[in-house]
Amino acid sequence: MLEHLSINSLGVIEETTVELDPGFNVVTGETGAGKTMVVTALNLLLGARADAGAIRAGDTKATVEAGFVLPADHGAIKAAEEAGAILDEDNSDRHLVITRAISASGSGTRSRATAGGRGVPVALLSEIGEHAVAIHGQSDQLRLKSTTAQRHALDAYGGRGVAKALVAYRRTYTSLQDTSIELQELMSQAQERALEAENLQRSLEEIDNANIEENEDAAIQERIKRLESAEEFRDAARIATTALSGDDYNLDAPSAESLVEAARQVIAQTPGQVDELEEIGKRLASVGIEIADITAEISQFASSLTDEGPAALNQAQSRLAELNRLKKLYGPDLADVVRWAEEQRPRLDELHGDTERIEYLEGQQHLLSERLQEEGAALTTLRQQAGKQLGEEVTKELHGLLMPTAQFSVAITPAEQPGPHGLDEIALLLQPHPGSEPRPLGKGASGGELSRIMLALEVVLANTDPVPTFIFDEIDAGVGGEAAVQIGRRLARLAKHVQVIVVTHLPQVAAYADRHLRVNKAPNVEAGFTTSDVSELVGEDRISELARMLAGHADSTSAREHAKELLETSH
């Protein structure tokens, strides 16, 4: 709800703060007192265009402020918090204060807005107001103006049945959209994906045909090294073997094996053996055995150096070049090449499966399209039922608001193509009198009539999805008597569900209010200007105001009696 409204230097109002009731609030006052400034202030707070002409004469700046209390999950609270507003918390509710300042300057009109103490763009006030306040005035019929809002209102009125059907439809619509997008991508990229599959197939075949073994590149490098140095290795082995054992060679130099054996024999034949020499002899024997083993291993190594010739070397070098090429393309290491191939195989399977996937998606698209039509038709039927009932209820309300020949209806027509909200275009229509063509809401109706139309509609929709605060400006234009009583009664009924603020000239309407506010005019003839403020009326003061509205002055005894009767019958 709207807790308070403060106005400073706007129109004829110098400075005032109005505390508002959560139910039915009425604003009255003499003509020219500045009642419309209350609505003007609220419009400014809701993002209306600033006009320097609204600033009080003699001042250069006007400010307005409003305090709201709303649930923490309310759309207006979310919008304010996203803009950085600082909010006071009260259990599950949040307190939001917004301000708007306008000033006149040489270059035009300046405007500044805040929400929760933070400077915000004026456009944010419109977003907050869209969720928090609906203004119905002579020139501004903001709520339910768009086709989106009208569709939302009808669906909310339709209740759980429409909501359930809409959820099912949207689920199918989303699935159909996803399927169609994937199918379109596959078909539009068919040539590109076929080329990717061909290149990938070639790469995998190349790697598979290479039959790569673990650490094969290191082994081949070692083999190339041996093949390139085979002759040098054989010569070195021959010389080493001769130096160790002297076998099969006629060299003058004694072998290491013979020298060790000779030293061992000398020690063994030395008379008077001692422990030290005996130990040395044993070690020489071990050395001889070790030399013999080394000699045998060198001989074995020499035997392994077969003379494979240039062909074997060329083959090893070619294999190494092939492995290096694969590493450059898919490496950097040989293990990375093998890993890359394994990781790419699923992608190749996916690309090869495009044809099957396209066929499957085409089938799904057909099934989902049929289901969407079925669910859309079911949603349309429920909307038609809700629309018929809504039209009848609003028409009944209009007849009680001095529009006895008016007919309200909901037009549900096929949309050009299915959308996320159904197969329908929805419009709220009014037929002012028999024989006339039903026209979109707001076309062909006067401001007062339009306010009554919106009142009738809001009363019917009050239990479905209303905004927290409704403001009606001059809703009573051109009516009186029983019609005025009916307007007051319906406003009171609406106020049981939401906060209602009404600017009115009709005592029959004002009598139904929970809080009565009067705009007081105080002309200053000598200074040449008029000042107004706002005060709450209770008890005798309220009776006096109602009497003034009835008879033109507050002292009429009959008017005061009539005013008391109005208050008694309205509560």
Image (spheres, rainbow, N blue to C red):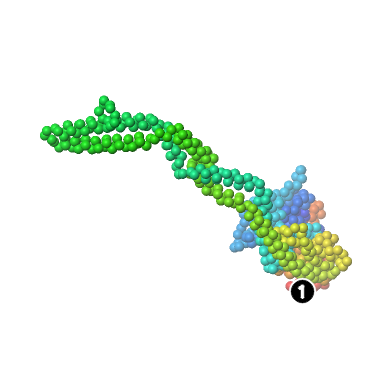
**The N terminus sits in image quarter:** bottom right
**Residue 195 at x, y percent in the picture:** 63, 45
> Residue beneath label 1, please?
569
Quarter of image, res 206: top right
Question: Which residue is farthest top?
Answer: 252
Q: Residue furthest right?
A: 435
Q: Residue at x 67, y 59 (%)?
A: 363
Position of 123 with respect to 291 (left or right) is: right
Q: Nearer the viewer, residue 169 or 235?
A: 235
Q: Which percent across, then down, holds residue 263? A: 20, 31
Residue 197 image position (x, y, % from top left): 60, 47
Left or right, 206 with respect to 487, comes to left
Q: Nearer the viewer, residue 117 or 78?
A: 78
Residue 353 visible at all:
yes
Q: Quick one: SS at disc 1?
A: helix
**Snapshot quadrant of residue 22:** bottom right
Residue type at mark 1: give it. Answer: Thr
Point out residue 114 in the picture as x, y percentages from the top left corner.
67, 52
**Number of residues whose C-alpha sits closer than 10 Å to that of mark 1, classed few (under 14), some (14–19) or many (20 or more):** few
